[in-house]
Image (cartoon, grey):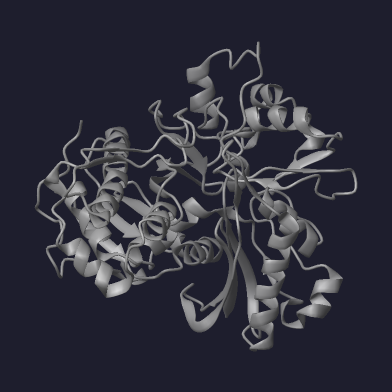
Amino acid sequence: MKILALDLGTSSARAMVLDAAAQPLPGALARRPVVVTQGRDGAATLNVEIYLAAVVDCLDELAAGGWLDGVELVVSAAQWHSLLPLDAAGAPLGPVMVWLDTRAEVPDGAVGPADPDAFHQRTGTWWHRAYWTVRVPWLRARLGTTPARFVGIVEYVLSVLLTDAPMSVSQASGTGLLDLTTLDWDGEACDLAGVRPGELPSLAPEGWRGRLRAEYARRWPALREAWWAPAIGDGAASNIGSGCVDESRAAVTVGTSSAVRLVQAVPAGEPLPPLPDTLWRYRVDHRRVVTGSAVSSGGNLFAWARRELRLPDGPELDAALERVQPGRGLWADPRFGGDRPPGQAPAGSGQLVGLSFDTTAVDVLAALMNGVCQQICGALSVIESTVRRQVDVVLGGGALAASRWWRQAFQAALAPRSVRRIANPEIAATGAGLLALGLIDDPKWSARAIGWMDDVDSPGPTGRDQPATP
């Protein structure tokens, strides 16, 4: 059996083929970079038609290479929180707002949830610009026409490709409009967003499977009989793909942004565990929740620093970082893109403290990278308070795969916890496959089979003093 996995991220659209154990087949990967248009006003948008074309191009490439032959199941891991308005015919009325967009504001005079704590416990979210409760009214007030429906980027892509494309409970939970217990749209959240049920996607029931439209079945005949599983949030998929499938182990993932998350088994209808006021909670599927915290900086910060500071690449940069002592007094606030919820800091909130005439560009990069480590470590401590134990950690994500120094900086910040990393660069796709196949529910399946590895071959920053905090 072969599985086609789509990873619909912020910086790229990827399609790959997995084996029956949900592991990527060597060479069976197609990738198209996508460009987020960002503005000084906090705008961060994607052109959805260009994005759709990128996905189709990826599938065309795999089809041309014969990789789609034998595919029986298609899975998707997709970015959370995106918002796209559609007209009555289903055509986009503008670009997609992605998670990086910080423009949305609560309307003057608007009244929030009657009981903010109860709202947070029920939906796992806040009345915040990252969620549809604030984004929809803000966007509606600025459109020149009246939208008929609102969807996320993955729902639009799948609605074009499939005969039916309901929203998964995982993606719905990222909107901030879902009751995480009943798995239905939350009445108070919908009132805050100013949406009626008909303006929201239908929700996929447990066990839902989709099929390709006829025109795409003709384009990719190898997928004619393949079943499509509901899309899950890329963060939830990354946890599963990292082997972090229960409350004994947390995943720290650094891709475009950074996050730390813990999965717990909470079937629909059962009471949710208490949720600290600084953490969010979304759905993995009908049986599990994922609790965590995210920051806006990760690989995007590393790429910015390398570009703007004109740093070397590859081994030369690695060698320069190994000479940096993080305790030299330089401190960084890495919130270049502003706060993720529940924080309210706008884009442009980054800071550097402790600059001197002997500060180098590599010192600045190291301080920024370590700033992300400290943010994630603080959030993990809060997550651990909910399970009353110290948890093991698995590091993953493309940004960490590219920097040994950064991995070791995380190990130092997370000590004395047990810290492993996973070498698979496609953990979200693997996670979506494992979930759809039901492998993580199989008593014979072990998370250790996914290929963790320790990363202590060089001392790097481990054991050195941490940066001073102003």
Depth check: 338 or 123 in front? Answer: 338
- On screen, 265 above or below 280? below
- On screen, 192 above or below 348? above
Residue occupying the far front of the picture: 357
Q: Position of residue 320 (x, y in %)?
A: 20, 65
Q: Position of residue 300 (x, y in %)?
A: 44, 54
- Total numbered badges shown on the rendered structure: 0
Depth check: 113 or 143 in front? Answer: 143
Q: Position of residue 97 (x, y in %)?
A: 65, 43
Answer yes or no: is residue 255 visible. Answer: yes
Q: Which quadrant: the C terminus?
A: top left
Q: Residue at x 86, y 33 (%)?
A: 146
Residue 315, by quadrant, is bottom left
Q: Position of 358 compared to 151: left or right?
A: left
Depth check: 23 or 16 in front? Answer: 16
Residue 57, by quadrant, is bottom right
- On screen, 376 above or below 57? above
Q: Residue at x 48, y 51 (%)?
A: 236
Q: Position of 136 compared to 396: left or right?
A: right
Residue occupying the far right of the picture: 89
Q: Residue at x 72, y 48 (%)?
A: 95
Q: Position of residue 13 (x, y in %)?
A: 60, 65
Residue 67, by quadrant, is bottom right
Q: Position of 284 compared to 96: left or right?
A: left
Q: Which quadrant: the N terminus?
A: bottom right
Answer yes or no: is residue 242 visible. Answer: no
